[in-house]
Image (tube, rainbow, N blue to C red):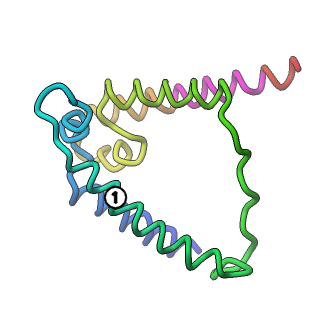
Amino acid sequence: MVPLSFASGLVFALGLCLSGMVRPSKVLGFLNLGGAWDPSLAFVMVGALAVFAAAWRWTRRRSAPALGGRFPAAPPRGVDLRLLGGAAVFGLGWGLGGFCPGPAIVGLVASRGAVVFVVAMLAGMLACDLAGRRTAEDG
């Protein structure tokens, strides 16, 4: 399983690099709707969705995963305050830093900005985890 995970991560990282999505300027250009808008990220997203749609159709016909195990349970449906808050914080981080988590990790090898972003992202994840544990203990 590790070699497949490594290969998948490598393909993902290469795709991010080839598409330029590890460069914050590319992402910020996509988010700049009032100026010199760069639509290339939309094409990357459409390409990723096409691959996912094909894989999803193939997977839905199977009774079990191709490499063993079981399919995970479906995630809960619905929109709540926690989802909206998380999406807002993610969007703020994306817009301010120009990185998504995946491209930031790939960018660690070439960008000081990515290092700062990943450290801040990990601190935010830790804070969220600690807050969730406190809520669970209190409730």
SS at circle 1: helix
Q: Which residue is found at the position 50% from the left and 75% from the top?
A: 3
Instruction: Give left or right: position of 8 versus 76.
Output: left
Q: Which residue is found at the position 26% from the left and 48% from the top?
A: 41
Q: Nearer the viewer, residue 116 or 68?
A: 68
- Image coordinates of residue 136 in percent, x first then y, are 83, 26
Instruction: Give left or right: position of 69 versus 13.
Output: right
Which quadrant does the C terminus fall into? top right
- Image coordinates of residue 97 in percent, x first then y, are 31, 28
Within 10 Å of the Cα at label 1, are there few (<14), some (14-19), or many (20+) other Cα atoms? Answer: few
Which quadrant does the N terminus fall into? bottom right
| Residue 37 position by quadrant | top left
Q: Nearer the viewer, residue 39 or 64?
A: 39
Q: Which residue is found at the position 40% from the left and 67% from the top?
A: 50
Magenta segment, which residues? 123-134
Q: Which residue is found at the position 60% from the left and 29% from the top?
A: 126
Q: Which residue is mark 1?
A: 46
Q: Nearer the viewer, residue 6 or 77?
A: 77
Residue type indicated by callout 1: Val
- Image coordinates of residue 61 in percent, x first then y, are 65, 81
| Residue 113 position by quadrant | top left
- Image coordinates of residue 130 in percent, x first then y, are 69, 24
Instruction: Give left or right: position of 127 versus 38.
Output: right
Determine the main secondary structure of the stretch shown in magenta. helix
Q: Nearer the viewer, residue 69 or 36?
A: 36
Instruction: Give left or right: position of 46 versus 73.
Output: left
User: In the image, is residue 55 above or below residue 113?
Assistant: below
